[in-house]
Image: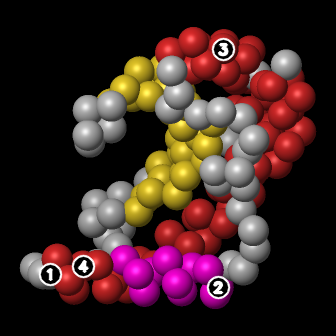
C-alpha cells in the first residue's frame, strides 16, 4: 500500500512523464463549449478517456442529442469502443453525461510498469476524440 503522499507523488510523476512523452496541446477543457470537456482518467484500477457534459441539464440535453445524432459516425469512423452513458454518476454523486473509452487491461497508476501502455492509449484515443470533435464541432455547437 502507498501513503497518500506516496500516491500523490506517483500521480504527479505519471502526469509529468506523460506530458514529456507526448508533448502536445490537448483540447481538454478548451472546447469553447460550456460544460463540454475532454478528460483523461487514471487511478489504481483503470484508465479511460472521456467526453463529459457537466453543465446544467438544458445544455447537457442539447449537446447529448447532437452527439447521439453523430453516434454512428463516432463509432464507425473514430472510436468503435466508445460507451455512451446519458446518466453517469461521478464519485462525488454529481450526475453528468459521458462518452468514454476504457482501457480494457487492468492498470494502476501506482504500477510504473503499466504507465507506457496507458500513455499510448491516452495518446491514441484522445487524438481520435479530438479529430471527431474538430470535424463535427459546428454540428455540435449549432
- Sooner in the amino-acid sequence: mark 4 or mark 2: 4
Q: Answer above or below: position of 65 versus 54.
A: above
* Residue at the spot 64% in from the left edge and 87% down from the top edge: 20
Would you say residue 99 is visible in this rendering?
A: no
Image position, residue 26 (x, y; %):
71, 62
| Residue 14 counted in the magenta span | yes
Residue assigned mark 1: 2
Q: Answer above or below: position of 79 versus 110.
A: above
Label 2 crowding class (10 Å Cα cut-off): few <14, some 14-19, many 20+? Answer: few
Q: Find residue 111 and name its label.
A: none
Residue assigned mark 4: 7
Image position, residue 61 (x, y; %):
58, 13
Q: Which residues are magenta?
A: 11-21
Residue assigned mark 2: 21
Q: Answer above or below: position of 106 versus 16.
A: above
Q: CA distance from mark 2 to mark 3?
A: 36 Å
Residue assigned mark 3: 62
> Left of 2 or right of it: where is 108?
right
* Residue at the spot 57% in from the left edge and 12% down from the top edge: 58
Secondary structure, mark 3, is helix
| Residue 77 counted in the magenta span | no
Quarter of the figure that contains the C terminus: top right
Quadrant of residue 4 within the rendered picture: bottom left
Amino acid at each position: 500500500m502507498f501513503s497518500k503522499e506516496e500516491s500523490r507523488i506517483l500521480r504527479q510523476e505519471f502526469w509529468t512523464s506523460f506530458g514529456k512523452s507526448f508533448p502536445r496541446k490537448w483540447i481538454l477543457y478548451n472546447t469553447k463549449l460550456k460544460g463540454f470537456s475532454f478528460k483523461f482518467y487514471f487511478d489504481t484500477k483503470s484508465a479511460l478517456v472521456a467526453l463529459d457534459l457537466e453543465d446544467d441539464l438544458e445544455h447537457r440535453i442539447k449537446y447529448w442529442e447532437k452527439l447521439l445524432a453523430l453516434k454512428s459516425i463516432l463509432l464507425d469512423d473514430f472510436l468503435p469502443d466508445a460507451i455512451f452513458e446519458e446518466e453517469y454518476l461521478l464519485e462525488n454523486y454529481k450526475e453528468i453525461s459521458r462518452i468514454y473509452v476504457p482501457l480494457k487491461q487492468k492498470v494502476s497508476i501506482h504500477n510504473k510498469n503499466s504507465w507506457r501502455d496507458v500513455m499510448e492509449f491516452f495518446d491514441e484515443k484522445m487524438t481520435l476524440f479530438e479529430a471527431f470533435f474538430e470535424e463535427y464541432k459546428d454540428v455540435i455547437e449549432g
